[in-house]
Amino acid sequence: MGNKKRGSGTHGHGSSKKRRGAGNRGGRGNAGRGKKAKHKKFTGMKEGVLGESGFNRPKKLQNDQNTINLKEIDQKIDTFVEKGFAEKKGDKYVFNAEEAGFDKVLGSGTLYRDIDVKAKKFSESAEKKIEENGNEAVSL
């Protein structure tokens, strides 16, 4: 009992080449599900079964700040004046980032116009670039 297939080499399944790889069984996992009428349609994506669940950082570690770059301030200064987030005093502009809904000013880009910037926080590069142009970076 139990040793009928012993020594046959194929164990009753024919050539070993016929049993090789996932293609012989129609793919791996749920591949090919729902192609035929007798099979149930695969609904795994709706249920969130497939794929990685991801990783969420704890809320106390998340620091969601609304930021703006110097380049954006320079490009959109006229729009900010229209909306009342900036004032034009002669040739100089005064931009209030807090009124515009931004918490921090970042240093990407350069200021081609004379713009004094008021904000809660500045990155080191932003503060440096603003002051290099002879403008003021005012912390609120």
Image (spheres, rainbow, N blue to C red):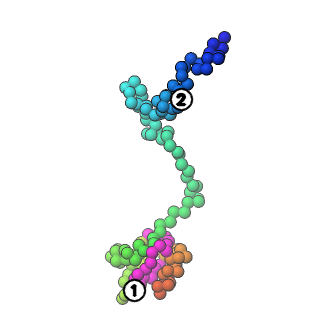
| Mark nearer the viewer, 2 or 1 | 2
> Which sits in the foreground, 21 or 53?
21
The residue carrying pointer 2 sits among few (fewer than 14), some (14 to 19) or many (20 or more) residues within 10 Å by Cα, namely few
Tell me if I can see residue 119 in this picture.
yes
Q: Quadrant of residue 11?
A: top right
Using residue 11 as the reference point, say whether residue 50 is left or right of it.
left
Residue 50, x across and y down, in percent? 49, 40
Q: Circle 1 sits in a helix, a strand or a loop, which is it?
A: strand
Q: Amino acid at mark 1?
A: Lys
Using residue 1 as the reference point, say whether residue 93 is left or right of it.
left
Residue located 54% across and 20% down the image: 14
As measured in the structure, the alpha-carbon distance from the residue carrying label 2 to the one carrying label 1 is 76 Å
Closer to the N terminus: mark 2 or mark 1? 2
Residue labelled with disc 1: 92
Residue labelled with disc 2: 20
Res. 111 mark:
none
Residue located 43% across and 31% down the image: 33
Q: Circle 2 sits in a helix, a strand or a loop, which is it?
A: loop
Q: In the displayed structure, would residue 102 be above or below residue 117? A: above
Q: Amino acid at mark 2?
A: Arg
Read off the magenta span.
Answer: 101-118
Residue located 64% across and 17% down the image: 7
> Which sits in the foreground, 111 or 60?
111
Residue 75, x across and y down, in percent? 37, 75
